[in-house]
Amino acid sequence: MGMHFDTHQKMHTGQQLQLAPRIIQTMEIMQLPLPALEEKIAQELESNIALELEEPEQEDDIVQEIEEPNEFENDDDYADMPRQASSIDGRDPKLDAMSNIRARQESLSEQLLHQWGLADVDATTLNIGIILIGMIDTDGFLTCSMQELSEQVIKDTNNESSTDQIEKTILSLQKWLDPPGIAARSLQESLLIQVHAFAADDPESWNDVEVLIENHLDDLIANRLPKIATGSGIGLNRVKIAIERMHELTLSPGRLLATDRVLPVIPDAFIEYDDSKNKYVVGVSNGSLPPLRLSPTYINVANDANSDEATKQFIHRNINAARWIIEAVGQRRTTLGNIVQIVAQRQCDFLDQGDAFLRPLPMVEVSDILGIHVATVSRAVADKWVQTPRGIFPLRRFFSGGTGSNTDGDMSWEAVKTRLQNIIDGEDKNKPLSDDALAKKLREQGIEIARRTVVKYRQQLGIAAARLRREF
């Protein structure tokens, strides 16, 4: 009995595993934004012999018009226009797609090591510098203690290095690495290095900035400007000018050499106003790739009775994998189109009038309308951008809960945040509004809101409390 159970279990697991890659692939493709999808497809084209790009028959096929879209069909008039250009001029679109795979951007430490390799320093300094670069954090700082730095240098070189030698190397790093401020041991040191770099061309206008950073940084962070004006003896006006200059400095020099891969923002879908139909129409973008198809050549080989069995099996595996990809891309397109169609209908007030008119649109409601799982909606919305007449927005922005407002009907939390931002933008900065006063102002606009909710939104918007917003 035990043996029989074991065999059955193995068979069952095997069946489950056959299903898994397909489901995972569909989920993954649903989640990818357009640039990443183009990359994924380019990689599949490279690795799968049975997957091809469909050549357009003739130039007339480039724009496929769809007459009158039904409620959840994509209006493709403009969505497909750019997509087939590459295959018209005689180039191979499959090669074009592969050449579009972007090179991986170098990490922060890789970029700094390249720079350090060009520095004019002795061998000992060079070697210690290589070790220290490995300890620089993503903001560009060396925050480890001198003891930790010494221990790491000893471990990597098997040589005792004096703290003087390490100190000398840190100063060399600060001198040779770009942007200025990298390899500083604190925010204060980083800002001063940046000031000295700027002051080389224009010493006069950076003197006050240097004094403030050197002696009054804590007060600056807490916005205690009158105290700084008195303490520094330079007066409120010069303090304000110096703070204005400080906006040219960066708090995270390391992040100027982006360490993450940053894909460009390319809209995955469009909402446009069609004058002739007097309504908003929706399209889903294919990017630079024409439609995919199964290779007719390899389908023939797979169906040919004379092909040997191993070849057939190999080609069948590739054909199945290619079919999954094509289906997953199609499903992504349909789902995304349907979701954006609902957004265009529900958020037409926003499209007409702007941020303060976003309506609540919970994902679960969209999943009910389309009869798909809420997780699928969430994946389809993730990392996607939509081109609208008001600009390009993350698709996620259109989805949120909301509040009952007795003047404008339901209003999304995003719209309430916009109203809050507008009130704060318009306040008298000599007497900024307290959170209670902000809640009262919103209630005057017909929005029922508690003070604690105002505090939460203010923090989410990155706006400081009233005492820190005060200008002197």
Image (cartoon, rainbow, N blue to C red):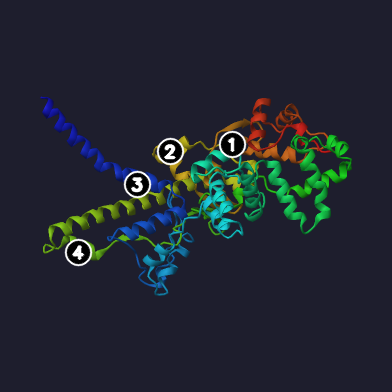
Count residues near mark 3 (Cα–Cα under 10 Å), then give few for <14, some for 14-19, many for 20+: some
Q: In front here: 116 or 37?
A: 116
Mark 2 element type: helix
Q: CA distance from mark 4 to mark 3?
A: 26 Å
Q: Position of residue 149 (x, y in %)?
A: 57, 40
Please say whether residue 71 is visible from this viewpoint.
no
Q: Nearer the viewer, mark 4 or mark 1?
A: 1
Q: Earlier in the sequence, mark 3 or mark 2?
A: 3
Q: CA distance from mark 1 to mark 3?
A: 48 Å
Tell me the residue at 84%/54% (across/down).
204
Rendered position, 84 above or below 70: below
Q: Nearer the viewer, mark 1 or mark 3?
A: 1
Q: In front here: 269 or 310?
A: 310
Label number found at residue 147: 1
Count residues near mark 1 (Cα–Cα under 10 Å), then give few for <14, some for 14-19, many for 20+: few
Which quadrant of the view contains residue 309? bottom left
Quadrant holding the N terminus: top left
The reply to whether the C-beta atoms of the residues labelled 4 and 3 are less than 8 Å apart is no
Q: CA distance from mark 2 to mark 1?
A: 56 Å
Mark 1 element type: helix
Label number found at residue 367: 2
Q: Position of residue 377 (x, y in %)?
A: 44, 41
Q: Nearer the viewer, mark 4 or mark 2?
A: 4
Tell me the residue at 30%/51% (across/down).
324
Q: CA distance from mark 3 to mark 2?
A: 20 Å
Q: Earlier in the sequence, mark 1 or mark 3?
A: 3
Q: Residue furthest bottom?
A: 90
Q: Label 3, on which residue?
A: 25
Q: Label 4, on which residue?
A: 300
